Amino acid sequence: MRRKAAVLLLLAGLLVSGALTAPAAYALHPVRPRDQPPAESGGGVPDAEMAQQQPSAVVWGCPMCETVRHSEPGSCPVCGMALVPMGAPAAARPAGAELPLMPGLPPWLFFSIALLVLLLSFVFLEVRGRTARIRAPGSRLDLLRIPGLRALLRQPWFPLVVQLPVVLLFALVVAAGLFGNPAPDRNIAPILTWTIWWALLVLLVLFAGKLWCTVCPWMALADWLGRLVPRLERPWPRALRNIWPATLLFVLLTWLELGYGVTQKPWLTAVLGLLMFVLAAATVVVFERKAFCRYACLVGRVSGLYATFAGSELRAADEDTCRRCTTKDCYWGNERGAACPTHEFLGTMRENTYCTLCLQCVKSCPEDNVAWNLRPFGSDLLESVRPRKDEAYLAVTMLSMSAFHGLTMTPTWDRLVQAIDRATGLGWLVAFSVGMAAMLLLPLAVYYGICVLMTWGARDRRYDAATLFVRFSYSLLPIALFYHLAHNLQHILFEGTKLLRVSSDPFGWGWNVFGTAHMPVGAVLPVEVGWAIQVALILVGHLYAIVIAHRTAHALYPDPRAATATQIPMLAAMLLFSFQSLWLLSQPMLMRTAM
């Protein structure tokens, strides 16, 4: 009992001390304005020393690639960013040069790829528009057949051995965010969270599905807490047994992240991380199993829909074996493994959406009837997805919010918010909120209008616009997913090496643990290579979306003419959203943790 009380007291103390000391830490380390350069450049070369070396000439440098220095203005030969005068006061800089902007796709590439997307769309519609092959399940490769892997996953110390390092990193992020230097480019909290983790999370989902849930620090801590305190084990409210809570949290976090500049505030990044832990812990203590993961975790639900495209899955190796099973150990658990935290039965699970890859079923199944398969990309969307209204609205919200993230990093968004502010006179935050609401609702309205046109074109009253809204929404997921990947790639290529610097000085206190605190950072690849990868990702997402919509249309309408009539408005919507993605990638964008 004393042990439990000590743990609870420690957790409460951490939360209270963090809340009390965050403002003090923020006040002790004021954030320098964007238009005031630091006393020392990010690469460790004092600007005063640079000025002494060339007292009569202005030295122009790249705000990203710190080894690039020129005697004249221009563009960085590595990343393409505009050069800025090093060590000059803000008033001496050219107009528009105060903020470091990552260059977007050049106009010739934007228009070329847009034309290619248009041509490929109509070629597909002409060649495949009137027919649809019945897709047989693609081939699978079971990773659990690797010698020793199944036995390894059954060990009592799994998943603790993979969770503990991530929990320690989470603790570092919280500590650095609350007590470290508040300058975002000198603190590991925003760089590791927003530049690295948030960007690589989508890439991890693409290949490994919900593997992040396996090591999630919020639920790991909540689970450990749940073993120390009494749990009420109450059922989750029936009215909330859907993913509307996660959708609302997703929109709310987006508003906080972008409206309050969370990526530029280490202390607020830490507070949001603690808030996720508190929500997870509260649901573990009050409700049965892990209701937060199933219904409310915005990270889990967003990655869950993306995971329907993933190249891996956890499934029953043989469905007949599951049908004959009377104990349902994977669902209820036994002495070898815990019950499924999200109420999934392996024998009827067809999609990755709600599986958290806890791998407890590998331990509990007495028949060793669990397979962890590599599979073709998009298998759930092409073979077995079961449409739901709440998932449909989250899918369209993900499409709009991923584009909104990109838009807010462009000068165009700043001008739009300023215009709304001038027109309403209600202040910047209200103007931002109005603009965000418009960006959230506009794609929903456009897509619903497209569904109305589809019903008119099909001339089939069996399916109204609301039904088509749900059924075709899954075909928008590849467009959202691959734009998300393309956008995040830009941040990884331009800002990813900052992690090497702050790893030596995570708190921004002047440490140099690994000898990398003063290393110059720069773009990982030439900007042209990044552009090529980005446009390839947009093309792949667009083509997958067309294929999924094509199969959905023919599954709903046996008449080929009706199926084709519905595909034409849907193709127009996909072209619109893909052109939007290309336009966003062609815009200059702010770095997340600008120097």
Image (cartoon, rainbow, N blue to C red):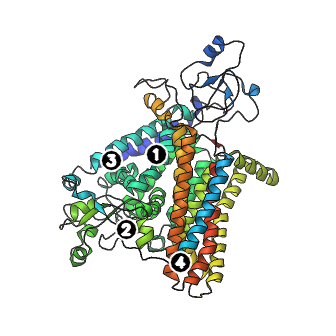
Camera-side residue: 503 or 270? Answer: 503
User: Mark 2 to mark 4: distance in Å?
Assistant: 42 Å
Q: Amino acid at mark 4?
A: Ala
Residue 528 in the image, given as x and y percentages of width and height:
57, 41
Instruction: Measure the C-alpha gap from mark 1 to mark 2.
Output: 33 Å
Pointer 2 local density, CA inside 10 Å: few below 14, some 14–19, many at least 20: few
Q: Which mark is residue 553?
A: 4
Q: For the residues carrying marks 1 and 2, which lies nearer the camera in this image?
A: 1
Earlier-in-chain disc, 3 versus 4:
3
Residue topped by disc 3 = 163
Instruction: Identify the residue position indicated by label 2 in the image.
Output: 234
SS for callout 1 = helix
Q: How many marks?
A: 4
Q: Position of residue 92 (x, y in %)?
A: 76, 25
Measure the alpha-carbon separation of dots 3 and 2.
26 Å
Q: Residue at x 67, y 53 (%)?
A: 111
Q: Which amino acid type is shown beneath numbered disc 1?
A: Trp
Image x and y of residue 152, in percent: 21, 51
